[in-house]
Amino acid sequence: MLDQGGIADRFVLQGRVSRRAPFARISLDLSDLPTRHNYFLALWQTRIEHILADWVGELAVTIYRGSEVTGFAQDDTGVDIELSDGRSLRARYLVGCDGGRSLIRKKAGIGSVPCDAERLFCENAQKSAAFHRQTSFLITF
Ligand SMILES: Cc1cc2nc3c(=O)[nH]c(=O)nc-3n(C[C@H](O)[C@H](O)[C@H](O)COP(=O)(O)OP(=O)(O)OC[C@H]3O[C@@H](n4cnc5c(N)ncnc54)[C@H](O)[C@@H]3O)c2cc1C
């Protein structure tokens, strides 16, 4: 995705490339993966966020920081959006990328993703531990 967005190099320049990835006490060789980015990149999350913020700043879009969507109403031509600071916006589309407890998806009647991430993580950890006792390693995607 970062490559398709033309910004992969920004991350690679600031990170540390490793052709081997540690997993469950073994070292996986990534060098023959069928991708141009066949490596593990170590990069602090704060750097990742700065790079993404710089990139977004270059795009021809208006960013409203510190504004929370509190409600909206749609009609045939678009949607009116209410913000917590009392302002309102008018847009053709509203996209609910507001996290796992998305207010927008909830109000739009769009069901949540049928996956409880925390439960899934715990189940996978248990399966992984059980599997690990029987075999030498487990790879999950
Ligand atoms: C402790 C922890 C560790 C994790 N570690 C990893 C990891 O190592 N690797 C990995 O791949 N995933 C990890 N995840 C999962 C990952 O963070 C999420 O899957 C991902 O952030 C979801 O992205 P998102 O854009 O859907 O939502 P979010 O990242 O939650 O973004 C939603 C955004 O919408 C904003 N927002 C919410 N409500 C409103 C509103 N009403 N009005 C305006 N804005 C609003 C929020 O402020 C936020 O900025 C981790 C999650 C947690 C909690």
Image: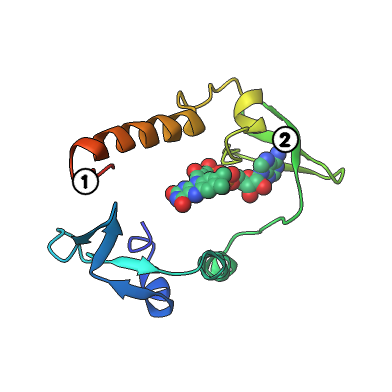
For residue 10, which quarter of the picture? bottom left
* Residue located at (60% from left, 39% from top): 92
Return the residue nearer the eye: 114 or 56.
114
Image location (x, y in percent) of residue 132: 25, 40
Residue visible at 25% across and 38% down? 133
Give the quadrant of the C terminus.
top left
| Disc 2 residue type (three-letter) | Asp
> What residue sits right under mark 1 in the picture?
137
Residue under numbered circle 2: 80
Disc 2 residue crowd, few under 14, some 14–19, many 20+, Cα 10 Å: some
Q: Is residue 106 above or below residue 134?
A: above
The answer to which of 34 and 116 lies nearer the viewer is 116
**For the view shown, which residue lies furthest in the bottom direction?**
13
- Is label 1 in contact with label 2 (beta carbons under 8 Å)? no
Residue 22: name its quadrant. Answer: bottom left
Looking at marks 1 and 2 on the same chain, the residue that comes earlier in the sequence is marked by: 2
Look at 59% across and 20% down and name the residue there: 109
